[in-house]
Image (cartoon, rainbow, N blue to C red):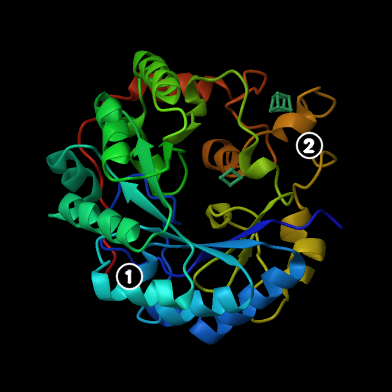
Amino acid sequence: MADAPLALLAELTHRCPLRCPYCSNPVELTRASAELAAAEWAQVFQEAAGLGCLQVHLSGGEPTVRRDIVEIVASARAAGLYTNLITAGVLLDAALMARLVEAGLDHVQLSVQDAEEAGAERIGGLKGAQARKRVAAALVKQAGLPLTLNAVVHRQNLHNLAHLIEIALEWGAFRLEVAHVQYYGWALANRAALLPTRAQLDEATGIVDAARIAHRGRLVIDYVVPDYHAARPKACMGGWGRRFLGVSPAGNILPCHAAESITGMVFPNMRQTSLAEAWAESPAFNAFRGTEWMPKPCQGCDHAERDWGGCRCQAFALTGQAANTDPACALSPHHGLLAEALAQAGETVFRYREFS
Ligand code: SF4
Ligand code: FES
């Protein structure tokens, strides 16, 4: 059996008050009526802990739209998991924060869409969002919890990256994750508006490098680069079925948070299959595990156990076959698709998705 996953991503809901154009949730969203109940999440947490998970990331959508979020946090803590809430922060108030802390919440990751108010509201599609996020950050700090800021960066906010780093310092974050958009799910529909230029990417990398030195000991900066400008792909998920374990709002057990974008794949559900069985034996988890499934040019390549052939979701989104070499690799016969996408980038208007 593959090594146990260390963390569980629990996607409690797809509902969200924001409408970010790079949302990585599936294009077909799960309705509230199909979401797992709190008692089912408690079972997921017990099973994840039994499998060896040490922490749970409570995510969405927006996890705080769930009225039972406090009960869910308490059950994660009761299972012995370190609990991290990944939130847009716009629904957090002092009363909810106090109840979450009492339930055993350990850490908060707060998303920011831009440094400037107008940009943040345009990108997230929600008026007043930035002011509410500032309040949420203060509540997290007052509660004595560690705060991480998540900034997804792209063509239309990269000019504010230095300012985003200042905001992380000002709001009291100890960690900032600067992640370039990854293009599957809804982000693919907005790719022409989001893809950065090579010059933007290089400038951003320089800003992150300098800030890491300037703020050493005060702010840790994680940096996820876009692979449209790369010659080799990222080791997505650390390799399929090697480290990542996720559960979707409807209870599907996933080897990647975007795995349901690969149409035709069937995923085990926690209502019929235990997490341990899904992890060890399900066809979905074993489909791209290791290196035997790899086609040429990955088969025999000396990067095969470094990048695991790249990203299955990106291979599917761009070539229609999840088992193909990720086109982000210069050795892929489909690598030219990335240059074509870059040549077509420059759109300024976002396509927003409505959750009705
Ligand atoms: Fe990675 Fe496959 Fe490209 Fe080799 S050929 S670098 S294994 S994606
Ligand atoms: Fe699913 Fe990369 S996002 S494998």
Mark found first going from the N terminus, 2 or 1: 1
Q: Residue at position x 36%, y 77% from top?
A: 99
Snapshot quadrant of residue 197: top left
Query: Which of the two residues, 167 or 202, is positioned nearer the viewer here?
Result: 167
Confirm or reject: label 2 Cβ below 8 Å from ligand 1: yes
Point out residue 236 in the picture as x, y percentages from the top left corner: 62, 39
Q: Residue at 76% across / 25% down in the picture? A: 303
Q: Please name the residue shown 70% across and 50% down the image.
A: 243
| Residue 137, visible in the rendered structure | yes
Q: Position of residue 208 (x, y in %)?
A: 41, 24
Q: Position of residue 238 (x, y in %)?
A: 67, 41
User: As rendered, which of 63 and 84 lies closer to the eye?
Assistant: 84
Does the beta carbon of the residue at mark 1 sit less than 8 Å from ligand 2? no
* Residue found at the far bottom of this picture: 39
Q: Is residue 31 visible?
A: no
Residue shown at 42% from the left, 43% from the top: 174
Classify residue 296 by image quadrant.
top right
Where 262 sits versus 143, above or below?
A: above
CA–CA distance in space, label 2 to label 1: 47 Å
Q: Secondary structure at mark 1?
A: helix
Using residue 95 as the reference point, say whether residue 109 is left or right of it: right
- Mark 2 neighbour density, 10 Å: few (under 14) some (14–19) many (20 or more): some
Q: Of helix, strand and loop, which one carries label 2? A: loop
Q: Quadrant of the N terminus?
A: bottom right
Q: Position of residue 145 (x, y in %)?
A: 41, 59
Instruction: Give the quarter of the figure containing the C terminus.
Output: bottom left
Three-letter amino acid code at disc 2?
Met
Q: Which residue is mark 2?
A: 294
Q: Nearer the viewer, residue 132 or 331?
A: 132
Q: Which residue is mark 1?
A: 97
